[in-house]
Amino acid sequence: MATSGVNNQQYNKAKLWEIGFFALNNTATNLYMFILAFVSYYAAGVAGIAVVVVSTILMSMRIWDGVTDPIIGFLVDKTEGKFGKFRPYMVIGNIILAATILVLYNVTHLLPESFRLLFFIAIYAIHIIGYTCQTSVTKAAQTVLTNDPKQRPLFAIFDGIYNTLLFTGGQVYVASYLIKKHGDFNMGLFTELNTLALILSGVFTVLAVIGISSKDKKEFFGLAEDTVKTKFSDFWPLLKGNKALLKLIFAVTVDKLAFSLLRHSVVMVMLFGILIGDYALSGTVSMITIVPTLLITFWAVAKARKTGMKKAFLFSTWIALGSFVALIAMFTLIDGSSISMSNLGVTTILFFVLYTMAMGFGGVPSTLVNPMIADVSDYETDKSGRYVPGMIGTLFSFIDKLITSLAPAIVGFAVALIGFKDAFPTVTDMLTPGLKLVTIILAFVIPAVALIISGLTMSRYELDDKKMAEIQESINAKKSKSKVA
């Protein structure tokens, strides 16, 4: 057990490469999230399933994803075998993910039309189970990786770099290479994209398993005692009794719902395609903001290591809030069409700066949430003696997915109020006062309100750096007492 003494406090420390390798577990599952962002093109264009039906299925699958979270989390906490608590779920989950993608894309369109829909739903539902198996570990295993407050935030750096490269690079790979090579979203494109994703995800999972292997042992499980006996009905008392978990869930899910609205494809069309009048600018902004966003992440992690994750969370929240307020004022006063790459004046530069700060600092809470959930798990262990990181992590995910699944409905309701009842706004629609108002509300006002709520909630969050030091000291004392006994 690698330890580090800080104020006479002994911490379970991880090697830097172990943190970097384990962070790839999240990237491995995000690869599948990325390729399935295009599954509607396969379902409708190749398998011949109606567009409306596909949209309904995908929304239902997100709810199913949330339902499976607490079930898998419960099983993770019950597991303790030769290969540890977490590694079996990483490996089994990735195998299920790979197998279901191969079956989904290679079998569905070959079946009789009357069976395709049911088959698609069944395989997709199994895929979600595999996804939940592997993703549940990303949050839960943070507790054994390291409990050093100076180390836990480092996960966010690796995770931030990997995911920025994945989602930005992946979009460029699909749009600039695969589409040009194959001409459209067809079986050739899906085969090439999915094959690369399956291979990379498998490699990343192996590296993540290696990264966590020295820590996936009983001596690092809570108080290092026998697996705690829990019942599925313990989820409600756990949520009700852990105030820190309640506050973290509320603060982060409110944020994520607001940013889900801002990133919604329709809102992006309304903001860049109609209000600004240049939809291609959205891609340009994404590329320009990569480096500043990563730098903001590095800064936030450095601050979290120095002052604790609560302070980094709050500081980032208030900066993002100020940026959104400035954006609201800006678009209320100016003509959005004055923002253009061909007109790099004060207005365009100011928009780039404010938008980057809003998105960069606004994304910090979501970046820090995984190690913060580990803090909450340790808080529960110290408070009740129960080591249930799987239940805590998946309880967060369950509520998060249920809340953020409301984003499409909110967007649909908002645009219906201004007359778009049969179709969403497109880049060909003219800008009207009503459309401008709804765009500003969805893109900037709701995120600003969410940040206020999130900041006020987190200001009352118990687990600051001093409290976490006390908790780790208490857990170590209880472990030592247990060994003596």
Image (cartoon, helix red, strand yellow):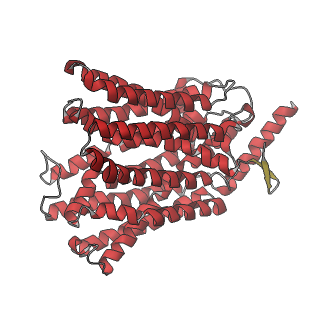
Q: In which quarter of the image is residue 450?
A: bottom left
Q: 481 left or right of 152?
A: right
Quick one: quadrant of the N terminus?
A: top right
Q: In which quarter of the image is residue 418?
A: bottom left
Q: Which residue reaches farthest front? A: 181
Q: Which residue reaches farthest bottom? A: 346
Q: At 37% across and 51% down in the image, what residue appears?
A: 173
Looking at the picture, tell me which residue is in the foreground, 450 or 208. 208
Q: In which quarter of the image is residue 431?
A: bottom left
Q: Position of residue 320 (x, y in %)?
A: 43, 64
Q: 191 left or right of 46?
A: right
Up/down of 355 relative to 76, above or below: below
Up/down of 218 relative to 268, above or below: above
Total of numbered circles in the picture?
0
Q: Where is residue 4 in the image (x, y as percent from the top left)?
A: 78, 52
Q: Where is residue 46 in the image (x, y as percent from the top left)?
A: 23, 32
Q: 34 left or right of 70?
A: left
Q: Where is residue 369 in the image (x, y as percent from the top left)?
A: 53, 49
Q: At 61% across and 32% down in the image, what residue appears?
A: 87
Quick one: quadrant of the C terminus?
A: top right
Looking at the picture, tell me which residue is in the foreground, 433 or 289. 289
Q: At 20% across and 30% down in the image, what residue appears?
A: 48
Q: Is residue 153 visible?
A: no
Q: Can residue 333 be seen in this view?
A: yes
Looking at the picture, tell me which residue is in the foreground, 204 or 15. 204
